[in-house]
């Protein structure tokens, strides 16, 4: 019988790190994704906290740049939403792509992708794998590494308000961009 | 231009909501089996709200036998839902917090992927809401479709939804809700205690129980359906399966009208109609004479050995012009279920330890193996099956009674002054069962009392004497 | 650190948390949601709590990190049912003494994850959990044993009962309670790309998921595992469910820091 046991005894160093919390953003609502204090890098290699995105509405998807299946459609649909927004409202909305494959989607790769797809003014994020999972969890996004270095994942586009609360989620493969734009403009 | 697109989109959105808002909203008509909600009286479509809860709970599947059922609304089958063609249904499916499994619902009345299954997939302690429009009239099965779907159905997760045609259904005097389903248990039919689901038997389609409305006797005896002479009865019949197709038949009646497979096609003057697993039928018949109509799956071993037997008690005046008075169809010579027992089963035997317990266990053996012929109350059937109540034949010679059960008998026999000329098969009961059932008989129905020990049965089995018919009478 | 920090100062954990763990030697296995001839999954060596986390252990954890108290936890991370089986005494939610040694349930994935992380551990992955859960009492792959699956399935045929942790026999690895007590959270439970609609799950639904269509062909012969996958796919990370708890895992390297064998 193969039974080996250990007693793992740990001083809670992690707790210290965890608990030196930043009071900076404590005033977000209880259902705001900005309660996640994770750190990310943008396509310009800039370090930001998730909560730095607060203040504008968000149109957000989790994809990866080498994805050949539905991701290109999701990005196109997000662009269509952008194009359906009146010029005057565009400043109030941020378009965000979060990479499900942060190891290979470095800031440089993200930058190239943004240029190639013409994603002007968008925010593309790469982060620690654990933070990617945590964000996926709050957005109810399922994903899984599969063969051929691909990741299968939910086709969701999420719309969040300026406080980081989920307003609506739609199937990114079948979205109706004008309706989505309507949601963006007329939610509270 | 862009602004216009948005305006149009918003307009569409608004009109959509307004449209929904225009329909009057009401709670759906629902009922607990075997009852059926009243006919729909409105002649316009509505938005009807259905609230249903999935519950996992232990209930009796037969006398002394419990089973962990998975249910819609706590009953098997689940709540009967009655809506009208063209209605919009807003379905709220809640999964009880105590559930171990997620559940969902696939309504065959839904036009759309999975019949709503993916949209209604719900973890314990949560509620899902989805909507659909009922486009086609008919009687439709609903069931849980969560993986593994066979197990969810096998545990009782099914029911019926009736979509009345716009013009309504012809009024009848009585409507009932009957749904067949089969169960696969670790122990064989009648084995006492909480019986777990047996996946192996389910895959091999070897059902232990085939029942109407979730348990043996759910619509028989005290729970029988009722009607009066001269009334027309409509049965909404479903079959949850998971595996077996039902040969639905009512002994002593001919279906005047059958909505074949629950659809629009009407067949007339039908004796037995097929109900597919995951399918339904609507049957109508006028009852002309009093008596007990027996509802069966005419795959007949299921009726007499596995529980697929229900009753409709019809009361009123005799009509000898239509029927002279005999009651039971003798062709079905039922045999005890125990005959199918497999030697070497490792199930734990529950053994009676007192006279009271012997009587109680014996009653179960009687109901399972003997009652189909000798009747509840041991009255027997004149000229077919001799009585066991106040039976001189039984009381006179206990040893002979043991022999009859061990070896069966055939030929003429006189009981309480009446002559019977039939045959009784060897039932294949265990020594304990024989001792218990005889003890039960001796202590009931005005018999003279007494107790048979299993050892006596063992002794007689070893001696191997068969019984001579009509000995001493 | 990726820990969920909520902007609240909490107390430093002064003491130590020690829990008995089993060493699991890595290996390969073929999980349920792959067809029979697909590649095997390899699991590296790791360590796993012998038993699920108990109510009293979770209560102690909250004492150190009050952010996870029932009254303070933000709705992003759980729902109203969180720790709903505890009672409130003197404004503090706590287990009844009789519940102390029962497995904690009604906890969200976020809470479970934080609990493990505070101890320098993590939740086991689905692959790890399934790898250990397929062991019987005498061998690493119990599925070859007669009656093994039926014993697991029997849990579904019984009413819920509250039992203390650690009462089932050790499996091959010396781990208890994987079957027959509660469901358990896994780190990547959200990697189940099935709809829970069993007829549709023979292949992945490309309307809902971005993937090559043939990614996950199900082989539903292992019904017990089939039901666990079905259950996981119904979950969201903030759900708190009355029969869902968790245990923690760790890296095999940590075994060297420990004592005992």
Image (tube, rainbow, N blue to C red):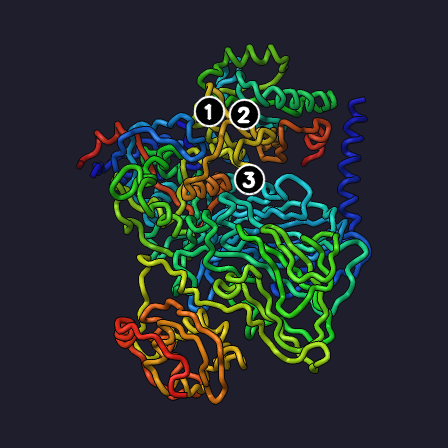
- Judging by the rendered image, the residue that carries numbered circle 1 is A146
The tag earlier along the polypeptide, 3 or 2, is: 3
Q: Which chain carries label 3?
A: C
Q: Residue at x 54, y 38 (%)?
A: C195
Q: Is residue C236 left or right of residue B198?
A: right
Number of numbered discs present?
Answer: 3
Instruction: Find numbered disc 1 in the image and state the secondary structure of the residue it sits on.
Output: strand
Q: Do labels 2 and 1 share a chain?
A: no
- Judging by the rendered image, the residue that carries numbered circle 3 is C199
Q: In this view, does B104 lie to the left or right of C57?
A: right
Q: Distance between the residues labelled 3 and 2?
A: 19 Å
- Judging by the rendered image, the residue that carries numbered circle 2 is C211
Q: Which chain carries label 2?
A: C
Q: Position of residue C189 (x, y in %)?
A: 45, 36
Q: Do labels 3 and 2 share a chain?
A: yes
Say which quarter of the image contains residue C27.
Answer: top left
Q: Position of residue B69 (x, y in %)?
A: 48, 57
Instruction: Find numbered disc 2 in the image and state the secondary structure of the residue it sits on.
Output: loop
Whether residues under marks 2 and 1 lie with C-beta atoms below 8 angstroms apart, the answer is yes
Q: Which residue is drawn at 58% across and 35% down?
A: A165
């Amino acid at each position: 019988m193969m039974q080996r046991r250990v007693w793992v005894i740990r001083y809670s160093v992690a707790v210290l790190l965890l608990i030196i919390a930043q009071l900076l953003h404590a005033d977000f609502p209880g259902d705001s994704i900005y309660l996640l204090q994770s750190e990310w890098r943008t396509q310009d290699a800039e370090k930001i906290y998730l909560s730095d995105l607060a203040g504008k509405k968000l149109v957000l998807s989790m994809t990866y740049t080498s994805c050949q299946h539905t991701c290109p459609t999701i990005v196109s649909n997000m662009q269509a939403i952008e194009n359906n927004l009146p010029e005057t409202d565009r400043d109030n909305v941020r378009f965000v792509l979060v990479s499900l494959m942060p190891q290979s989607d470095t800031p440089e790769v993200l930058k190239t992708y943004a240029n190639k797809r013409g994603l002007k003014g968008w925010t593309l994020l790469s982060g620690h794998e654990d933070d990617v999972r945590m964000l996926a969890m709050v957005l109810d996004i399922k994903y899984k590494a599969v063969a051929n270095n691909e990741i299968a994942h939910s086709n969701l586009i999420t719309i969040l308000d300026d406080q980081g609360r989920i307003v609506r989620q739609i199937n990114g493969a079948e979205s109706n961009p004008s309706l989505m734009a309507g949601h963006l403009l007329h939610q509270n | 231009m862009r602004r216009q697109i948005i305006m149009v989109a918003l307009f569409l959105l608004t009109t959509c909501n307004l449209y929904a808002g225009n329909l009057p909203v009401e709670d759906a008509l629902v009922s607990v089996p075997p009852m059926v909600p009243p006919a729909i009286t409105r002649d316009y479509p509505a938005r009807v709200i259905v609230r249903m809860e999935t519950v996992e709970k232990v209930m009796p599947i037969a006398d002394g036998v419990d089973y962990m059922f998975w249910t819609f609304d706590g009953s098997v089958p689940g709540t009967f839902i009655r809506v009208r063609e063209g209605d919009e249904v807003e379905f709220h499916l809640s999964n009880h917090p105590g559930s171990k499994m997620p559940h969902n619902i696939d309504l065959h009345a839904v036009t759309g992927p999975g019949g709503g299954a993916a949209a209604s997939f719900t973890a314990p302690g949560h509620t899902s809401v989805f909507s659909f429009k009922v486009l086609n009239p008919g009687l439709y099965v609903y069931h849980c479709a969560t993986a593994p779907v066979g197990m969810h159905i096998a545990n009782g997760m099914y029911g019926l939804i009736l979509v009345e045609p716009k013009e309504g259904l012809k009024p009848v005097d009585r409507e009932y809700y009957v749904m067949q389903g089969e169960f696969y248990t670790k122990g064989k039919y009648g084995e006492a205690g909480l019986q777990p689901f047996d996946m192996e038997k389910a895959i091999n389609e070897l059902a232990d129980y085939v029942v109407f409305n979730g348990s043996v006797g759910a619509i028989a005896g005290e729970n029988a359906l009722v009607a009066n002479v001269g009334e027309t009865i409509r049965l909404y019949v479903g079959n949850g399966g998971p595996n077996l197709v039902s040969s639905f038949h009512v002994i002593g009646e001919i279906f005047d009208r059958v909505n074949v497979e629950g659809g629009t096609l009407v067949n007339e003057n039908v004796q037995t109609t097929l109900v597919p697993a995951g399918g339904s039928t609507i049957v109508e018949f006028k009852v002309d004479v009093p008596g007990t109509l027996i509802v069966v799956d005419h795959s007949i071993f299921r009726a007499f050995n596995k529980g697929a037997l229900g009753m409709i008690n019809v009361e009123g005046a005799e009509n000898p012009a239509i029927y002279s008075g005999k009651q039971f169809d003798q062709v079905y010579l039922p045999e005890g279920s125990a005959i199918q027992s497999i030697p070497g089963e490792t199930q734990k035997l529950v053994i009676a330890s007192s006279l009271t317990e012997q009587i109680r266990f014996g009653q179960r053996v009687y109901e399972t193996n003997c009652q189909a012929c000798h009747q509840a109350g041991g009255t027997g059937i004149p000229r077919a099956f001799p009585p066991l109540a106040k039976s001189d034949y039984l009381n006179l010679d206990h040893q002979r009674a043991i022999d009859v059960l061990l070896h069966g008998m055939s030929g003429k026999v006189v009981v309480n002054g009446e002559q019977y000329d039939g045959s009784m098969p060897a039932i294949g009961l265990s020594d304990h069962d024989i001792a218990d059932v005889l003890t039960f008989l001796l202590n009931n129905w005005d018999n003279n009392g007494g107790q048979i020990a299993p050892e006596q049965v063992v002794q007689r089995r070893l001696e191997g004497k068969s019984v001579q018919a009509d000995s001493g009478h | 650190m990726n820990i969920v920090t909520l902007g609240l100062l909490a107390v430093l954990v002064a003491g130590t948390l020690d829990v008995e763990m089993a060493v699991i030697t890595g290996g390969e296995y073929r999980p349920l949601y792959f067809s029979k001839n697909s590649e095997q999954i390899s699991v590296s060596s790791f360590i796993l709590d012998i038993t699920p986390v108990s109510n009293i252990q979770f209560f102690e954890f909250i004492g150190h990190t009050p952010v996870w108290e029932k009254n303070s936890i933000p709705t992003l991370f759980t729902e109203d049912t969180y720790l709903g089986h505890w009672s409130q005494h003197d404004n503090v939610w706590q287990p009844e003494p009789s519940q102390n040694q029962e497995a904690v349930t009604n906890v969200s994935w976020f809470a479970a994850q934080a609990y493990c992380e505070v101890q320098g551990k993590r939740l086991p992955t689905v692959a790890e959990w399934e790898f250990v859960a397929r062991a019987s009492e005498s061998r690493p792959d119990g599925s070859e044993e007669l009656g093994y699956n039926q014993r697991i399935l029997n849990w579904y045929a019984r009413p819920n009962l509250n039992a203390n942790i650690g009462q089932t026999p050790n499996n091959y690895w010396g781990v208890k309670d994987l079957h027959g007590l509660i469901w358990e959270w896994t780190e990547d439970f959200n990697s189940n790309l099935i709809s829970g609609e069993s007829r549709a799950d023979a292949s992945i639904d490309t309307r809902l998921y971005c993937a090559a269509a043939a990614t996950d062909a199900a082989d539903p012969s292992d019904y017990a595992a089939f039901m666990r996958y079905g259950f996981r796919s119904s979950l969201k990370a903030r759900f708190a469910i009355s029969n869902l708890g968790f245990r923690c895992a760790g890296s095999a390297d940590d075994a060297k820091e420990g004592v005992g064998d």
